[in-house]
């Protein structure tokens, strides 16, 4: 009977809807789950006649409540947040180290020139001369300690970059595998929503490591590329990213896809890779070079000035400092074997108590030195300007990080408003589809009663 067929199709449609609602509720706490719904369509009459209402209802497909634009916004925000959050711990550590009085080069310089000032009152005093040597050693230690911190940060950046590249390769491979599964599943008519959710989660994680562009393909796969256009995943094929170490110790990224090899430009990478690259090239490397320039300038100027004077015994002055740009732990040091009597404070070999050359040494603090990132700056002002510049860069990144976190939170909320499960809405759906199922079963029951009554009448006749 048509009545029974219609009611049966309605009951089956209600069952499919209830099953979908139950799946949504079951995954209400599943990260990245995209809620689903049923598409219900009427079936046209299969026989002619004005009294044929129709052939029931069908569920031609399930739908995913997914918005590609909102997903893209979420991935872009993940990239920006990854970039800003990666750089901040390094900036914070440098701020703490360079702002600490115990390690401040400014304090070391003040102590060194303070000892020179004290010695100018009595240039022949052995204790005062020894104090100059002691303060020179302390100043050297401050430079070496800061240089060690900077070198350790560079190594940490290299290690984190290596770990990020390994994660990127793993995620790219997983996305390519999921692309294959999704295409095969959809080709057989099976619901691939769970696989698509898993793939989107991996793309989101990947976006936090490096900025990506995503393009949907007709077969259900997604192509993923870097911001600069180089492919990371195309269909079921994934690229392989690698790190090349250069002779100067720096690192270069390469991307191999199929038989092609790309040298990646280190600008606009986004994600963790972009944050590491931005910190290394905009903050760390210039700061390391500036500290090296400053140490070299102090050693050169002090040594040259001492070379113009005479020691207590009237012999020509000798260098106080030794500078080695290649050493991360002993870049600046007091020359081994130097003693207080060797300090050439006098400008006259016959007058050991003369302090003319010592006064010229004291005046060095007010003379300019050349620092790569600053240009010509007074020796006493270099560290202050470097510290101030670092603080400004850190504050700018913190502000950008706060904005990036807000954008990320908003993009997640926007995505959830479309794709997330609303338990109140699902509870309402369950009630409606339950009523739909019960009503159709009642129709079947009534139809059976009518059919049985008809049979009884025919049998009684």
Image (cartoon, rainbow, N blue to C red):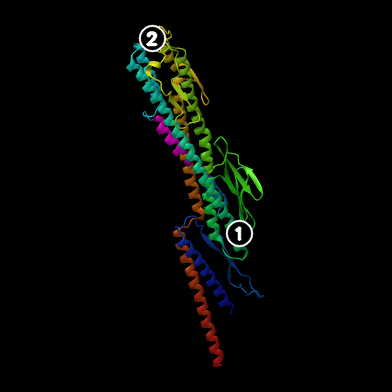
Q: Which of 274 and 156 is in front in this view?
A: 156
Residue 97 within the magenta-colored segment of the rendering: yes
- The residue to which callout 1 is attached is 180
Please give left or right for residue 258 compared with residue 208 in the image. Answer: right
- Neighbor class of circle 1 (other Cα within 10 Å; few <14, some 14-19, many 20+) is some
Q: Where is residue 231 in the image (x, y as percent from the top left)?
A: 62, 48
Of the residues under marks 1 and 2, which one precedes in the sequence?
Answer: 1
Q: In which quarter of the image is the N terminus?
A: bottom right
Q: Would you say residue 164 sits in the magenta stretch?
A: no
Instruction: Tell me if label 1 and label 2 are in contact, CB under 8 Å.
Output: no
- Above or below: residue 110 compared with residue 74: above
Between 450 and 372, the one nearer to me in the picture? 372
Residue shown at 48%/21% (left/top)?
297
Q: Residue 352 carries which label?
A: 2
Is 17 on the left-hand or right-hand side of 351? right
Q: Which mark is residue 193?
A: none
On screen, residue 60 versus residue 124, left or right, reads right
- Front label number (1 vs 2): 2
At a point 60% along the width and 41% down the height, the residue shown is 264
Q: Quadrant of the C terminus?
A: bottom right
User: Secondary structure of the magenta portion, mostly?
Assistant: helix
Residue segment shown in magenta: 77-99
Is label 2 in a helix, a strand or a loop?
A: loop
Report crowding for label 2: few under 14, some 14 to 19, many 20 or more residues within 10 A (C-alpha).
some
- Outermost residue on the bottom side: it is 461
Q: Distance between the residues labelled 1 and 2?
A: 87 Å
Residue 213 in sight from this viewpoint: no
Q: In terms of depth relative to the viewer, which is nearer, 427 or 335?
A: 335
């Amino acid at each position: 009977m048509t009545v029974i067929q219609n009611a049966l199709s309605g009951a089956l449609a209600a069952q499919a809807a209830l099953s979908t609602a139950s799946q949504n509720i079951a995954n209400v706490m599943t990260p990245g789950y995209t809620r689903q719904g049923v598409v219900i369509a009427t079936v046209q009459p299969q026989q002619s006649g004005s009294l044929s209402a129709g052939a029931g209802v069908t569920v031609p497909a399930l739908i995913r409540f997914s918005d590609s634009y909102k997903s893209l916004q979420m991935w872009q925000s993940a990239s920006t947040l990854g970039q800003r959050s990666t750089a901040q711990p390094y900036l914070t550590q440098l701020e703490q180290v360079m702002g600490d009085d115990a390690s401040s080069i400014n304090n070391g310089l003040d102590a060194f020139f303070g000892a020179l000032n004290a010695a100018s009152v009595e240039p022949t005093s052995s204790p005062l001369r020894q104090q100059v040597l002691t303060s020179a050693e302390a100043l050297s230690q401050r430079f070496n300690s800061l240089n060690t911190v900077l070198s350790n940060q560079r190594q940490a950046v290299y290690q984190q970059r290596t770990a990020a590249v390994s994660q990127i390769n793993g995620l790219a491979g997983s996305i390519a595998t999921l692309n294959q599964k999704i295409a095969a599943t959809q080709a057989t008519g099976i619901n691939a929503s769970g696989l698509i959710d898993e793939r989107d989660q991996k793309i989101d994680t990947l976006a936090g490591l490096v900025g990506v562009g995503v393009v949907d393909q007709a077969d259900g796969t997604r192509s993923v590329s870097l911001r600069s256009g180089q492919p990371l995943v195309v269909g079921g094929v994934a690229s392989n990213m690698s790190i090349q170490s250069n002779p100067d110790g720096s690192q270069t990224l390469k991307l191999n896809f199929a038989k092609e090899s790309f040298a990646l430009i280190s600008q606009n990478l986004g994600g963790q890779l972009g944050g590491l690259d931005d910190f290394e090239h905009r903050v760390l490397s210039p700061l390391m070079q500036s500290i090296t320039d400053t140490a070299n300038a102090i050693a050169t100027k002090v040594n040259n000035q001492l070379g113009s004077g005479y020691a207590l015994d009237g012999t020509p002055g000798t260098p106080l400092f030794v500078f080695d740009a290649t050493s991360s732990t002993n870049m600046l040091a007091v020359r081994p074997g130097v003693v207080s009597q060797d300090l050439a404070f006098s400008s006259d070999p016959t007058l050991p108590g003369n302090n003319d050359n010592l006064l010229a040494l004291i005046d060095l603090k007010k003379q300019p030195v050349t620092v790569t990132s600053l240009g010509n700056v007074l020796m006493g002002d270099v560290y202050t300007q470097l510290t101030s510049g670092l603080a400004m860069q850190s504050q700018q990144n913190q502000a950008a990080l706060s904005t990036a976190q807000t954008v990320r939170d908003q993009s997640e909320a926007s995505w959830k408003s479309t794709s997330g499960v609303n338990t109140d809405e699902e509870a309402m759906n369950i009630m409606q589809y339950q009523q739909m199922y019960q009503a159709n079963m009642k129709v079947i029951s009534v139809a059976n009663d009518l059919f049985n009554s008809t049979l009884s009448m025919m049998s009684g006749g």
